[in-house]
Image (cartoon, rainbow, N blue to C red):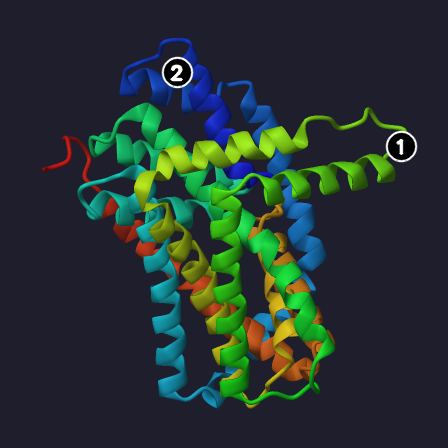
Amino acid sequence: MTAPERSETLGDRVERAIENRADTPGEIERAVEPPRRRIVKSAMWLAVTGISLYLVFPSIVEVFGSWRQITRFSIPWLALMAGLQLASFACLWALQHVALRARQWRPVITSQLAGNALSKIAPGGGALGAALQYRILVQAGLPTGSTVAALTAANLLVFAVVLALPILAIPALFRGSVDRTLLETTIAGLAVFAVLVGIGAVLLTTDGPLRWIGRTVQRVRNALRRKAEPLHGLPSRLLRERDRILATLGPKWKRALAATAGKWLFDFGTLLAALAAIGSHPRPGLALLAFCGAQVLAQIPVTPGGLGFVEAGLTAMLALAGVSPGDAVLATFAYRLFSYWLPLPFGLGGWALAPKTGAQEA
């Protein structure tokens, strides 16, 4: 299990500062800020981003060129997609609220909105978004060390769940025809996420299955990369990371797990609603695989939020799932409109409304 790039960068920098006895918020913040020599690296990333955007520009144009067909979406469907995305964000706020053990919701919500927006507009913005969220939380009075651990644990849990989703989609690939009604697709999605919560609870509370996963992944990796140095100790490492997550979440880990599954459930529901609104009902398993592929593509750091890569990948994968090319492009546009573009202005509002200084109120 690996964390998203932004979690690793934030955790590495801040934890090194803590180990060096940088106990004050100011010292931690200076440790998070990149040194001047990173300017050259940032310039290189900008160049890579520009080249990448040039390569995926045709896909972006194709997707956003479909905005003229937005009239195919009725007002109730648009309202439903907006509501599903709001529910997805609410689940993420609930997860972070548990991990941070915060008394107030305001710093959690505003910091997440601001960090999310920055991560989607800056090249390689995952680390910048995480650092901004951390800074806002610390300024709101949350302790420095536990804030780092909480954000890292939350990101690990979110990323681990999305990595597990394709495995749960495999059984659905061997059943039924291509077409499905909206009700059948919804029920299938709910079943998958119910199983996901159950499996997550087992992995968080027992050692045997997690050790088996570690041994299997380690064996496969060593078999595929025979010339590389063999990987050792992965099962133990997975257990240590699991224990760190549990220690951070505390007795409310069940609520955190449910919130994590809900975050992806409602996000996936947004894509299903976009497809259903234009009369397309692909097989749930294939639609879920397309959705998971889009989330992985969104982690590509060479463009902000995977811009271009997600549009190209999701459109192609939906077409493979049985959606007509035109409908795949339009559904991708609608999904990205609600999951990527519309939250951006709320990020500015989150930064403006975030508490600047002071401790949390009891």
User: Is 196 left or right of 346, judged from the image as shown?
Assistant: right
Q: Residue 18 shows which numbered tag?
A: 2
Q: Residue at x 82, y 34 (%)?
A: 222
Q: Earlier in the sequence, mark 1 or mark 2?
A: 2
Q: Position of residue 136 (x, y in %)?
A: 28, 36
Q: Residue at x 64, y 60 (%)?
A: 166
> Considering only vertical position in the picture, is 239 above or below 323?
above
Pick the quarter of the image with the N terminus: top right
Q: Residue 226 shows which numbered tag?
A: 1
Residue at far top of view: 20
Element assignment for label 2: helix
Pick the quarter of the image with the C terminus: top left
Q: In the image shown, does 358 or 152 lie closer to the viewer?
A: 152
Q: Position of residue 311 (x, y in %)?
A: 62, 64
Q: Is residue 271 visible?
A: no
Q: Residues within 10 Å of mark 2 (few under 14, many from 20)?
A: some
